[in-house]
Amino acid sequence: MPPKVWTLAAAAFAAIAHAVTLDDVCTVSYAKASLPSDNFYLGITIDPSSVIATPVTNAVVSGQDMYPDAVFDYCNVTFAYSHNGRNDQVLVTYWLPAPANFQNRYLSTGGGGLAITSGSGSLPGGIIYGAVAGTTDGGFGSFSTQSDAVFLLQNGTVNWQSVFMFGYQAHHELSTLGKEFTKQFFNMSSTKLYSYYQGCSEGGREGWSQVQRFGDEWDGAVTGAPALRFSFQQIQHLYSNVVEQTMDYYPPPCELEKIVNETIAACDPMDGKTDGVVARTDLCKLYFNVNSTIGRPYYCAATGSLANAKRQMPMSAPTPAQNGTVTAKGVAVANEIISGLHDLQGRRVYISYQPAASFVDAQTTYNSASNTWGATPSGIGAEFVTRYLDLLNTSSLANLDGVTYDTLKAWIYDGWQRYEDTLHTTWPDLTPFHTAGGKVLHYHGESDNSIPTASSVRYWESVRSIMYPGMSYNASAAALNSWYKLFLVPGAAHCSPNTAQPNGPFPQTNLAVLIDWVEKGIEPKTLNATVLQGEYMGENRQICGWPLRPLWTGNGTTMECVYDQPSIDTWHYNFDAFKMPVY
């Protein structure tokens, strides 16, 4: 569209915005005219010929964890850009609400595992709240291509541009271009555009990559169960296997499941409410003795193959029926896993999962030829060693022969040094973001079986101690909570409700809570959540903000958020295996 025509179109849009329809604006010519100018982002050139614009009406989403059910219309726009001096191409997609539903908001969304995008899975979460929602392929070749596919140029040669893009650069470009595209598309010459982010797991880490680096990029961010301390996190997936190897005992999956179920049953009432949900894993750590499960009978029927969508474990082989009792060796393995990685001198290297989390990383596989159970290294942990440390174009380890706790420590330290400025993502000084008025809503499932819940507590506490060093604990916690809040979700698994604790609530409306906090000043003292499954499905619950913990009184009828020092202490760790601070 020529400049004069665009000017007239913009004027018409401003004059009759209420009458403009999706079909009026969801065209290739209109989208091209709304692109940021050539000199808007130094070093980037947008390809106008790549623009695709498709109107979609009556889209339906239901049964999602991160946003409520909805029906909506939107304009799906995709275009490509390149970095000057490089022969590359980055694809971005933006879903734009129908003009009548636009609420002056922009939202970036993240990925999971080793993917920088969730595809279209997260975009409805923005449209529902009147926001333009964007995602990027990171320049990896397609929206279905994960970062590991482009990590190496050849064996031994890292494609550092892909690392920078995955680490933080692609999301900064997605937001910067997306906000300008939104302003142009809706002719926001003087209207405030509120900008947000929402992501979980790797998506949570991607959110922090921006909050830590670009203070004024977003007004607010929802960061769920972030994969912080990238090297620590990936090697953590191998720790359970090495525990089994070190102890020379490979528990049948049913034995571990029994230990978890007994833990849930024993620790459920510790918060004052018996509902099948362990809301106080800290009290569970303090008062539940896993040894009490020794001798308890278990039975699991034979199964076929099982796929693990999060890539923590490879495809499982069929398993026979399992019938036995919990052994002292099985409990010893469970206790060692929960205790967390220590080096051979007994010094703490990293943290592990809370009691009541399932032992996904410890799952064993059955060898029908030898009639024995054995460990198969976690897929994502193994790939970190072979591809990201050894720089080999392979994603699997044949075995963990000779791997000790000190080996894991060495791998963590190697990855920490190598990727500290790109993937580690624990910079604790958030002064620029705070000064710009930004807000963070950070949540983590208390029974997360993929990323230790204490990882999020560790980062919140690091930010508190770095940003408010001269204050008492309570004063600094209050100061931090005025703009950055952490919520531990009772019973929740990794970025989702937990089938083992189905009555647990899940914060499905996080973005709505954040929007109210940013735009209306409604500070969430507790986090709104809904039971999405089980016998209490649809029931509303409130989640306490850290460092307060939930305590029910009146026979489980009234919840209070209380300060409990012994409980808080269980979440604090001394990483004395390293001389460098572990934020």
Image (tube, grey):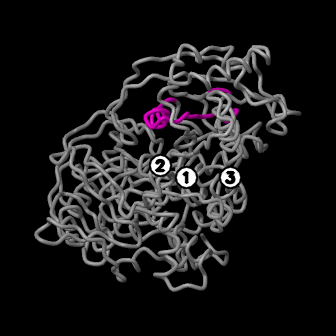
Q: Earlier in the sequence, mark 2 or mark 1?
A: 1
Residue sitting at x 35%, y 82%: 566
Q: In the rendered structure, which amino acid carries the disc numbered 3?
A: Leu
**SS category of the residue bearing label 2:** helix
Position of residue 391 relative to residue 462, above or below, is: above
Q: Earlier in the sequence, mark 1 or mark 3?
A: 1
Residue at the outermost left position: 555
Left or right of 379, for residue 59: left
Q: Position of residue 322 (x, y in %)?
A: 21, 47
Q: Quadrant of residue 445?
A: bottom left
Position of residue 270 relative to residue 222, above or below, is: below
Which numbered disc covers residue 220? 1
Which numbered disc covers residue 389? 3
Q: Is residue 214 on the magenta stretch?
A: no
Q: In the rendered structure, which amino acid carries the disc numbered 2?
A: Ile
Residue sitting at x 33%, y 72%: 282
Q: Quadrant of residue 431?
A: bottom right
Q: Is residue 125 on the magenta stretch?
A: yes
Report how far apart the C-alphas of labels 2 and 3 lie in the structure.
Answer: 40 Å
Mark nearer the viewer, 1 or 3: 1
Q: Which residue is the site of mark 2?
A: 515
Q: Are circles 2 and 1 on residues that touch, CB within 8 Å?
A: yes
Q: Position of residue 332 (x, y in %)?
A: 33, 69
**SS category of the residue bearing label 3:** helix
Res. 27 in view: yes
Per the rendered image, the range of residues in magenta is 120-142
Q: Earlier in the sequence, mark 2 or mark 3?
A: 3
Mark nearer the viewer, 2 or 1: 2
Quarter containing the C terminus:
bottom right
Report how far apart the C-alphas of labels 1 and 3 lie in the structure.
Answer: 34 Å
Report how far apart the C-alphas of labels 2 and 1 lie in the structure.
Answer: 8 Å
Q: Count how many numbered circles sit on residues in the image.
A: 3
